[in-house]
Image (cartoon, grey):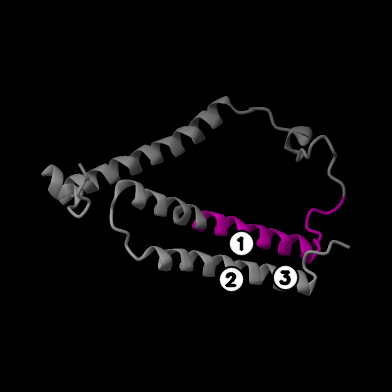
């Protein structure tokens, strides 16, 4: 039997829209309780003593030397931004990759023809690759 996904969940189960919002409210309260609980437990179990050695930042066993407000080379930020762009690309591609086989497996009609669906993903990947080639040509990825 193929499930009918055209009917909203509230209509299918006989519950109203208030019940759906109640579930969202309960989820919000659980998240808020988890956040507050973590802060309280950290305060109760955390270190109580203060002093110059305890308040000193710890960086993998290396004592901090120099001013903490010195400027970094802009390449650090450029590499970080490129990394974020490719991470977001992967996040956008995961639903695209997993949706097409799901439609085929369940026998459901796709939202759009498969060729169009595939072309949209290819255009997205092409735009990201063109941006990568542009960055490479500008010398952003060279580390001197």
> On the rendered image, what quadrant is the N terminus found in?
top left
* Residue 117 numbered tag: none
Residue located beneath label 3 in the image: 135
**Direction left: furthest residue:** 14
Residue at position x 28%, y 57% from top?
109
Residue 143 falls inside the magenta stretch: no
Residue located beneath label 2 in the image: 127
Mark 1 crowd level (few <14, some 14–19, many ≥20, 10 Å Cα): some
Lateral position of residue 17 relative to residue 74, left or right: left
Instruction: Give 74 or 41, whichever is nearer the viewer.
Output: 74
Foreground mark, 2 or 1?
2
3D distance between C-alphas at marks 2 and 3:
12 Å
Instruction: Identify the secondary structure beneath mark 2.
Output: helix
**Splitting the image into 4 quarters, where does residue 52 fall?**
top right
Instruction: Identify the secondary structure beneath mark 3.
Output: helix
Lateral position of residue 68 relative to residue 98, left or right: right
Instruction: Please tell me which of labels 2 and 3 falls first in the chain.
Output: 2
Foreground mark, 2 or 3?
2
Instruction: Please tell me which of labels 3 and 1 falls first in the chain.
Output: 1
Q: Give the x, y percent position of residue 95.
A: 45, 53
Residue at position x 60%, y 28% from top?
46
Instruction: Give 60 or 89, whichever is nearer the viewer.
Output: 89
Q: Give the x, y percent position of residue 63.
A: 85, 40
**Which stretch is magenta?**
66-92
Residue located beneath label 1 in the image: 85
């Amino acid at each position: 039997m193929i499930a009918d996904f055209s009917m909203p969940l509230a209509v299918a189960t006989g519950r109203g829209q208030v019940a759906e919002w109640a579930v969202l409210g309960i989820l919000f309260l659980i998240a808020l309780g988890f956040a507050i609980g973590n802060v309280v437990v950290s305060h109760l179990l955390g270190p109580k003593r203060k002093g110059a050695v305890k308040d000193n930042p710890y960086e993998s066993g290396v004592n901090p030397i120099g001013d903490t407000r010195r400027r970094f080379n802009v390449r650090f930020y450029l590499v970080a931004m490129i990394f974020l762009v490719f991470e977001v690309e992967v996040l956008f591609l995961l639903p695209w990759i997993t949706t097409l086989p799901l439609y085929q497996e369940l026998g459901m009609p796709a939202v759009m023809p498969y060729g169009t669906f595939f072309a949209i993903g290819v255009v997205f990947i092409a735009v990201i690759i063109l941006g990568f080639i542009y960055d490479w040509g500008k010398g952003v990825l060279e580390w001197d």
